[in-house]
Every structure is written in C-alpha cells, then in structure tokens.
Image (cartoon, grey):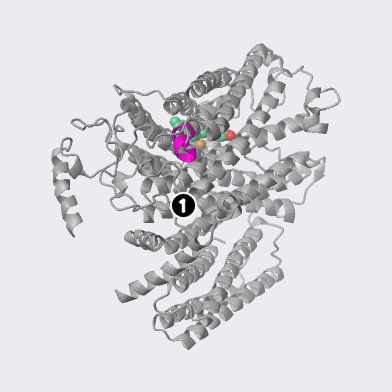
Amino acid sequence: MSTKNIELEAELHEHDHDHEHHQSFITKYIFSTDHKIIAKQYLFTGIFWAFIGGLLSVVFRLQLGFPDMDLEWLRPFFGKWITINGKLDPEFYLALVTMHGTIMVFFVLTAGLSGTFSNYLIPLQIGARDMASGFINMLSYWFFFASSVVMFISFFIETGPASGGWVVYPPLSALPQAMSGSGLGMTMWLTAMALFIASTLLGGINYITTVINLRTKGMSFSRLPLTIWAFLLTAIIGLLSFPVLLAAALLLILDRSFGTSFYLAEIFINGEALPNMGGSPILYQHLFWFLGHPEVYIVLLPALGITSEVIATNSRKPIFGYRAMIGSMMGITILSFIVWAHHMFVTGMNPFLGSIFMLLTLIIAVPSAVKVFNYLTTLWKGNIVFTPAMLFSIGLVSFFISGGLTGIFLGNSAIDIQLHDTYFVVAHFHLVMGSAAFFGMMAGVYHWFPKMFGRMMDEKLGYVHFWLTFIGIYLVFFPMHYIGIAGFPRRYYSFTNFDTFSMFTDLNAFVSVAAIITFGAQIIFAFNFLYSIFKGRIAPANPWRSNTLEWTTPRNPGHGNWPGKIPEVYRWPYDYSKPGAKEDFIPQNIPYSQTPESNLPFEKDLVEKEKAEKES
Amino acid sequence: MNQAIENIEIIRDRRAMGMNPSKFIVWLFIVSIAMLFAALTSAYIVKQSGGEWLNFNLPGMFWITSIIIIVSSVTMQLALSSARADRFNRLRTYLIVTVLLGLAFLIGQYQSWKQLVELDVYFVGNPAGSFLYVLTGLHAAHIISGLIFLLIVIVSSFKLKIHSRSLIRIEICTTYWHFLGGLWLYLFMFLKLNH
Ligand code: HEM
Ligand SMILES: [Cu+2]
C-alpha cells in the first residue's frame, strides 16, 4: 500500500509539472497534445485533401466526358502536362487517377475519418481526460502531416507524381524507367506512405490502449457506444494490416533502389533484358491486398459506428440488436483478413483456391447484411428527426446496400473474369466504400460540430448539401455499372479509341456533368462549415438530446474535458423513448436509482447494487 | 490544489482497469513488429513455393549469435531482479553486460553476412538470398533500437531513477529485449525449416 502511495506521489509531481507552465499558441494549437485539438487538425487536413482529391477527379472526368474539349485554361495549374494541342497528357491522366485514389483512400477516409473521430470521441465518450499518451498522439498527427507534405510536393516535380494506380503494382512501379511517374514521383509516394503507416500505427496503438485502459467507472464493454466499438476494431485491423503494407513497400523500395528481385522476374524493357531473376509481381499483390482489403473496412467501420450513433439518436429508439452489431463488426474484422485474394481472381490463381476465397468473400455479406437490417429496424417506426447528420446516415445505408449488392457479383470468381478491372468495380467500390464512408464522415461532422466548435451548422444549407450530393453520387456512379458490364476497362485515358464504346459518349458526358455538380455542392458544405465556426448559432449543451457522455461536458470543453469529476456510467447509451420515462432519453450518467418510473424488473436489482457501491 | 485533486483522479482512473497503459502500448508496438516479420516470412514461403529458389546452407554463425542473444536475455532478466532488490551495482553491471552482448550479437550477424558472401549468396540476386539479408538486417535494426533503449535505462540507473518502486522503464525494456531475442530465435528456426 505505502509503495503505491509513493509511486502515486511521484507521478503527481510529474503531472503538476506538465500543468504549471502556461500554454503558448504553439503548444496549444500547433504542437498540441490535447486530443480535441489533434482531432481538429486531422479534420482540417482531411477536408483540405478531400478538395484536392475531388478537384483531380473533376479534371480527369473532363477528359473522359469531353475528350475534344480544349483544356488550355488548365495550363497555369498543370504546366507542361497540358499538351500543345490543349489536351491532357495521357501519362498525367494516370497520375491524376493514382493520386486521386491514394488521397481519398488514405488521406481523407483513413486519416481524415478515423483520425478525426477516434481522437475526438474516444476520450469524450468513454469518460477519459485524454488519450493514453498525448505525446504519441501528437506524433501521429505530425507524421501524417509530413506524409502529406511529401505527397503534395510530388505534384510539382519534373517527372510528375506516382502513376501506377493507388495499388502501385510492380513491375510498373518497380522500374523507374517504365514510365515517368515511376521515377522520383514513385519514390516520394513510397516515402509518404511509409510516414503514413507510422502515423496510423501510432494513432491506432493509442486508440486501443485508451479504450481498453481508460474507461470511466461503470463503462463496461457492454455499455460502450457503438462508435467506440467501431473505432476500437478499426484500430485493431490497422495494427495488424499496416505493418504488412510496410513490408510490401520495403521490398518494393529495395527492388527499385538497390537492385534486388523480389517482385521482378525476367523482363525486357525497350528490347533490353534486365538482370533481375526469380522474383514475382504476384507476391506484391498478395502483400498489398492483405492490407488492401482490411483497409476498405478501416475506411468503412468508423463510418458505420458513427451511423449507429446518429441513427439511434435521431430515431429516438434504442439501436436494434446492439450485441448483434458488435458481433457483426467482430465478424467483419476477422473475415476481412481472409478474403484478400478476391482482388486477384484473374492473376492465374489456382481455381480451387479461387473457390475458397469466393466462399469466404460471400460470407462477409452476412455480417454486412445484419448491420443493414439493424439500421433499417432501428429506423422502423421511430420518431425520426431529420437532421442533416441523420440524412447523411440514411444515405450511407442506401449506398452500403446498393454497393454491397454488386460486391456479391464481383465475389463470384467466374463473373469476375468479365468484370475485373472494368468500371463495374469502380462503381462498386465508390458506392460501398467511397460514398458510404464519405457520408459517414459528413454525418459525423454535422452531428459533432456543436461539440467541436460550440456552435451549430446551418441546417438549410445542410439539407441542400445532402440532396445535391446524394442524388449526384447516384447519377455519377450508377451509369458506371453499365459501362463496366459492357467491358470498358478502368484507368484508360480515353473512351473514344474503340468503336464499341462510342455509344457511351453521351453517358460519359452526363456522368462528368453530374460529377462537377456534386463537387460544386461540396463548396456549400465548406462555406457552411467555415461560416458556422465563427458565426453559427451558439450550441445548446445537448442539441440532439443524446445519451452519450460527451454532451455532459461544458460547451467548449477545456483541457481534461470535465471541469470537475469524470461522470460515472450506469447504463448503456441507447435508452431512448424508454416506456415510463419522463423524457425520451436517459443519458448514461443517470443512475437507475433516479429513474424508478422507467426501470425494468432486472434493473431494479441494479438500484440495490448502486446503493451498495455508494456505501462501500 | 484543485489541479492536484484532478491529477489524483487521473492516476486512479488509469489504475482502475487493466494494466499500466505504457506497458500496454509497448505490447501493441510489439504486435505491429511481429506482423511486419510475419508478413516477410509469409512472403518468403509464397516466393519459395513459386520456384526458381536458390538453395544454400545457412551460415554457422547463426548458432553462435543465437546463444549470445539467449544469454543476453538472461542477463537482462537478472538486471530486472537486481532492480527489484535495489542492488544498484549489480543492476548496472548486468545492464552493461546486456548491451555488450547485444553488440556482440550485431557483430556476429555481420560475420554471418560475410559467410554468406563467401557462399556466393548476395543481397542482390536470387530472392532466396535477398530475403535472408532483409530478415537479418531488419531484425538488426530493431536490435539497435533495443540497444538505444538499454542505454537510456543505463543512464537512468546511474541517476538512481530505477529502483524497486520505479520499475516501469526497466520492465518495459526487459519485455522488449526478450521479444527481440524471441524474434531472432523464431527467424532462425523459420530459416532452418524453410531453406
Ligand atoms: C458484400 C460484400 C462485398 C463483396 C462480396 C465484395 C467483393 C469485391 C470483389 C470481389 C472485388 C474485386 C473486384 C475486381 O477487382 O475484379 C471488390 C473490389 C473492391 N471492393 Fe468490394 N466487396 C464487398 C464489400 C465491400 C466493402 C464494404 C468495401 C469498402 C468499404 C469494398 C471495397 C472495395 C474496393 C475499394 C474494391 C476495389 C479495389 C481496387 O481494385 O482498386 N467492398 N469487392
Ligand atoms: Cu476486397
């Protein structure tokens, strides 16, 4: 006992030390260790990248939709990448596609989504003063920042950014002489990704430790909000899969810069034989997709977690099947590691192996369907409040259904022979991953904006933003299914080189116009976001009448989140519209002894337990 | 004063459940390193089954370095128990011996590379050889990180910051060092069975 005390005192002194100095602007807002500030840093960086990534897609959609268009006006931005005829350089087209994919998957939907909401919500919703290690958390953001800087600079180098697709398959990516983007741009891509992996691991390690060790009294795993469950499982997936990507990148770097042959076999380039022998490019694909498939769930799970919270709150109903939700997220977590080869059905894989991966892939549809079912049943007969966040969450469910269905087609190894690497795949993953996760992120921003900035976003603008984006996304991606079934390959510079595809010219122009309008709608969001930070209506303490702990903090929570004691938790987070209760919500920190009118029979025993604990 | 009360609360909160967070963090780091090597050794198997594999004998030096790393784990453990018993001179001696053994291990690994070159197995060439260099090299890089950690612990032991009531740092260091030793033994056995 006494030794414990001394240790405690020793740590106390250390802590006092931390607190005594006054924080300057730099330590408060730039090199901050406060999870709320770090979350905002992630959010702003993520939004910045989202606009860059979106702009790139608009440029290549112009090329695809209007191949005859004069793009001379883009020369101030892209310089020599606009040819003398005012056309987009074909290799630069590939660079645009590559950077769009990399930015959206990793910088926006991994760092921008997990980084923002795991950081912001984990301590606030589990009742902790901060992350387990504020320092590691800060490091995590600055690694991401460094990664962003390297990736950004790669746009401006002579040979252009990486161009081998976001998956950067060798040998294209392994041989600097293969195309101009495989030179310095590729090296910078790998450097940026190595920094990014470090950032993700540091962040994830902190999230896991915090959730497991720093929950407030009473916050058992069966009372954890589904957001936190989702962030926890996401971090676990990241911890297990990102090191594998690091291994893949390491071997690629060695092949590129030191002459090894991990991924390179007998190969001729410009009629000249290279010395490399004995490697295999398929090896890279295995390593990449061992990360790559879990990565799509790293992107999606946090969005699903946010959706669970928003849908339950705004349906004013308990989430349907809380345990089933956790179970299916766990199922997805495990299954996501054993389906990677469905991205490789056409690599000459043994057909028997293909069937096994097909089976495992189709099994993933089961937990996914359970989640969809539970969202729908939560909405069913709810007193739905259509806040912008709620609309975005419902939009997510819609995209998850329509994109998930096409996954079932792709998961069949025989059908995939026709569909692989066509626009069908593009349609599939933009709906199920891209748009769904983006909507989850938007739902999160609209829902927690009042907590983050102490003000409300404008609802009307939110509705306009939602409807334009929701309809726009379907107009962009739905037609791509047809283009894909007709066999048009992805990552091709032009549709017009083949007569067969001429019939799609109008459709492609249509898609491009829809894409530009959808992008334009995001400017409404940007305006609403920035304007509301400074001029929005002052937020009430609990604007959505929600149960989770973050709404028990002051309007602008300071360092340590709660000025006094950390609230204790007595119940699960989904006591909405409980029969007999005075209000239609009972926050987690209200003991059962204060709600005798609504307690269920087994909860009456819990009242006794609470009393006993108070006395001891 | 208020601040102090709040701080007590922070500490209590942290003690309330599970193990000490910093130890937990280190375990998670270990998991990520383990995954990195799991990925590389899986890649090794996949590549090996793909054919065009160069067969050669492993350097005999690996036996010696394995023994060195096992002994260094023993001395590390002895350092920890000396710290628990507040025997500071023994603590420092064992820590320094551990560092020296770690350095000996690195030199030994370097010698084994020389043996490989004598066998005409080079870093650049058949992936079978390249893998061997990558696995040992990456492991050596982690050993270096472990040595830096050990040096930090040694410095704090001279500042009397490590004693029976302040063990976290050396406990974490011990965990990490044992892990690195175990990792090498895994790699060695793996290579023995698959080459
Ligand atoms: C019902 C469940 C799902 C099944 C059966 C499924 C199946 C597949 C298959 C077989 C492919 C490979 C197609 C090809 O390249 O030929 C694929 C691609 C893809 N899927 Fe899914 N999927 C499902 C859900 C999801 C979800 C939930 C996400 C993301 C959150 C996702 C993201 C992706 C991505 C990003 C790609 C394309 C990667 C690329 O080649 O660039 N899928 N899916
Ligand atoms: Cu997949």
Point out the stretch of residues depicted in magenta: A443-454
| Disc 1 crowd, CA 10 A, few/some/many (<14, 14-19, 20+) | some
Residue A283 x/y as whole percent? 60, 47
The chief SS type of the magenta part is helix
**In this view, B98 is above or below A337:** below
Q: Nearer the viewer, residue A14 or A207?
A: A14
Q: From this viewpoint, is residue A261 visible?
A: no
Question: Of the residues shown, which amino acid type is indicated by label 1?
Answer: His
Horizontal side of residue A114 vs A545, given as left or right: right
Looking at the image, residue B58 lies above or below residue A73:
below
Decide which of A458, A60 is in the foreground and name it: A458
Q: Is residue A420 magenta?
A: no
| On screen, residue A9 above or below A614 | below
Left or right, A221 with respect to A141, comes to left
x, y (%) of residue B42? 53, 53
* Local secondary structure at mark 1: loop
Q: Which residue is mark 1?
A: A559
User: Which residue is at the far front?
Assistant: B1
Residue A378: quarter of image: top left
Mark 1 CB lies closer than 8 A to ligand 1? no
Is A453 within the magenta?
yes
